Amino acid sequence: MSEKDEDLNKGGSGTPNEDGSGAASGKSVEELHAELEALKKANADQFQELKGTKAKLSDFEKAKLKQEEELLKEQGKYKELADKNEQKVNELSSKFKSKIMDGQVKDAAIKAGLRPEVADTFMDLVKNKYADSVSFDEDFNANSGELETFIKNQKDAHSALNFFATDNKPPADGGHGGKQNSKKGTLRDALASIY
């Protein structure tokens, strides 16, 4: 037998070792076969472990994506809620501005002689008209000249409705139908005449 054949029977490959010496490993074929089977088993075990790790990673990534989707949904809900709140604030702000401006028009009309008991009816009549005639500054204060002109114009336009006290002129006869009461007495005299 040649040296190479002996080397093969001992489990050697006849090729140089990693250190380049060319010496045989000194293991038999059965030992190498057993090592190969052990390496295959270890490799299969590691492959299964890797598969499990990949599955866990995949599950983790799915959970992360789901969490991100839920977060985006929540943010959408919060945005929707914020939009609703902003709309409500704008509505309340508009109502507040309207109340301030209405109050100024109403006060000016009362100062101009509007009877307080018909002030709400008068405001219902002129509510949408003053916005075109009266300007307001950023603090919602009315331009006084424009406001006076508007009130005067409304007073003239609605004079038949007797909204303003100056429109209620007493009758020329003093309200007694032209008859003069010749008896001027006190309430006591009137009661005494009845009893």
Image (cartoon, helix red, strand yellow):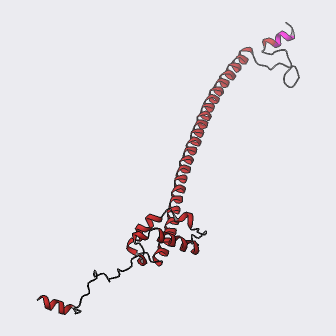
Taking depth in this image into account, of 89 and 19 the one nearest to the observer is 89
Q: Which residues are magenta?
A: 3-7
Q: Residue at x 81, y 15 (%)?
A: 13
User: How far from the left and from the top, in percent, is residue 128?
Assistant: 50, 62
Q: Residue at x 63, y 31 (%)?
A: 54
Farthest right residue in view: 21
Q: Splitting the image into 4 quarters, where does residue 187 fall?
A: bottom left
Taking depth in this image into account, of 142 and 139 the one nearest to the observer is 142
Q: Residue at x 43, y 71 (%)?
A: 159
Q: Is residue 176 above or below residue 7?
A: below
Q: Is residue 145 above or below residue 190?
A: above
User: How far from the left and from the top, in percent, is residue 174?
Assistant: 32, 83
User: How far from the left and from the top, in percent, is residue 61?
Assistant: 61, 37
- State the quadrant of the C terminus: bottom left
Q: Is residue 185 magenta?
A: no
> Is 166 on the left or on the right of 49, as rendered?
left
